[in-house]
Image (cartoon, rainbow, N blue to C red):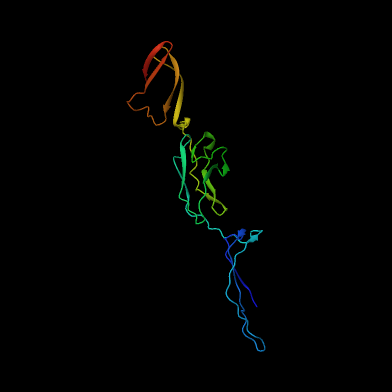
Amino acid sequence: MNECWLLQTDRFLVGTITSVSWFGGDAMKKRPGRRKRQFSKKSTSLTVEFLERRVVLNADPTGSVLITGSPFEGQALTASNNIADADGLGPIAYQWKSDSNPIPDATSPTYVLQDSDVGKVISVVATYTDLLGTEEVVRSQPTAAIESSSPPVRQSSAVSYSPEYTSINGRTFGYYVPESYDPSTPTPLLFMFHGAGGNSSEQS
């Protein structure tokens, strides 16, 4: 006689299983010289314990994590997501990263760019545990390299310096002249300056 056991399990084959059906019967064909046994169909329930996880069938998350905001020092970046999971979504946590390195205490959906981020790319990682107990990770695309919010320093190559210029009222000072200025033009340069001796203007 063969016994057929039907186990209805969860996807992990772990924990307590209480739905077990047993069907009594002779699954073998009648053989010569043996009398065929007849059994009525029966079912029962009992508890089965699986001590170790044997099979894990995980549904990968779909969707993405997005970053919005301007990549400039002092600006705020905001993380959002459209993640879906067939196994169910748990609470989503964020971790901001600068050049792939976790930024300390940067775990809220919003991050304000710091001076230390200038020249680096910023990304954010969303993590959660699905309702079947699997830890899931979804990463955003990195931003462009973060730029400084300070205005660029004008290079000295764009101007020339003339030291110790003496004005008509006897004041001596130095000044910068743009290299694009043509001294042969009839348009004069106008200098405005002020100091302890008062204000003045000068043409050259």
Image spot of residue 190 (x, y percent): 36, 21
User: Left or right: where does residue 142 sit relative to residue 167?
Assistant: right
From the viewer's side, name the closer residue of 25 and 148. Answer: 25
From the viewer's side, name the closer residue of 141 and 29. Answer: 29
Q: Which of the 4 image quadrants contains residue 203? A: top left
Give the residue furthest to the bottom.
Answer: 32
User: Left or right: where does residue 149 sit relative to residue 58?
Assistant: left
Looking at the rendering, in which quadrant would you find the C terminus?
A: top left
| Residue shown at 45% from the left, 27% from the top | 160
Above or below: residue 128 compared with residue 152 = below
Image spot of residue 175 (x, y percent): 44, 22
Q: Which of the 4 image quadrants contains residue 8? A: bottom right
Above or below: residue 20 compared with residue 41 = above
Give the residue furthest to the left.
Answer: 186
Query: Is residue 71 visible to us here?
Result: no
From the viewer's side, name the closer residue of 165 and 111. Answer: 111
From the viewer's side, name the closer residue of 191 and 93. Answer: 93
Image spot of residue 137 (x, y percent): 55, 50
Looking at the rendering, in which quadrant would you find the N terminus?
A: bottom right
Number of marks in the rendered image: 0
